[in-house]
Image: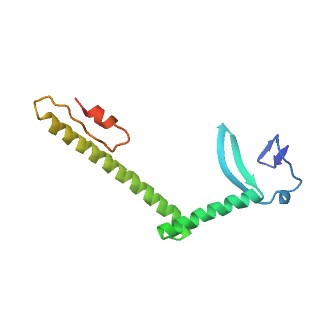
Amino acid sequence: MVNITGVDTEACCGTHADNTAEVGWIRIIKSQRISDGIVRLYYVARNRAIEVLNTENNILNTLCDTWGVDQTQIEQTASRFFNEYKRLSTIAKKQDQQILSLQVRYLLKDDATHPYFVKSDQADPTLYISSLP
């Protein structure tokens, strides 16, 4: 049994220690909600925890170097980049739709029936197909 006084008591399956000092460093990797009030924690301990912490620190340092910011600015910078990406993606999608609309209008203004081929760099051709009469 694992008992955290005033918090929870749970049946535990796995490796046990008499003292948390025996375990050493612990790093929670992620948590997952199983059901109401039940959360599963994924973690690593000892040397593996230190390896994960070092890897995370290397990622932070690489981002700082790449973005030219210090660690206190990483979250704010990432948020700004992500929001700008979303904004520019919306603009690009509207521009793609406008270009397609103009292409279709241009092709349909000719009354003759000719086969037309359009090479698209779009990953999903749905926009083209849905816009054709």
Q: Position of residue 44 (x, y in %)?
A: 73, 53
- For the point 67% across and 51% down, the residue is 29
Say which of 65 and 76 sits in front. Answer: 65
Q: How many numbered callouts?
A: 0
- For the point 48% across and 60% down, the residue is 78
Q: Residue 121, relative to residue 57: is it above or below?
A: above
130 left or right of 26 in image: left
| Farthest-out residue, left | 111
- For the point 29% across and 36% down, the residue is 128
25 left or right of 76 in image: right
Tell me the quarter of the image containing the N terminus.
top right
Q: Position of residue 111 (x, y in %)?
A: 10, 30
Tell me the quarter of the image containing the C terminus.
top left
Q: Position of residue 60 (x, y in %)?
A: 57, 64
Q: Position of residue 72 (x, y in %)?
A: 55, 68
In this figure, which colouring scheme has been used for the structure? Answer: rainbow
- For the point 38% across and 42% down, the residue is 123
| Farthest-out residue, right | 18
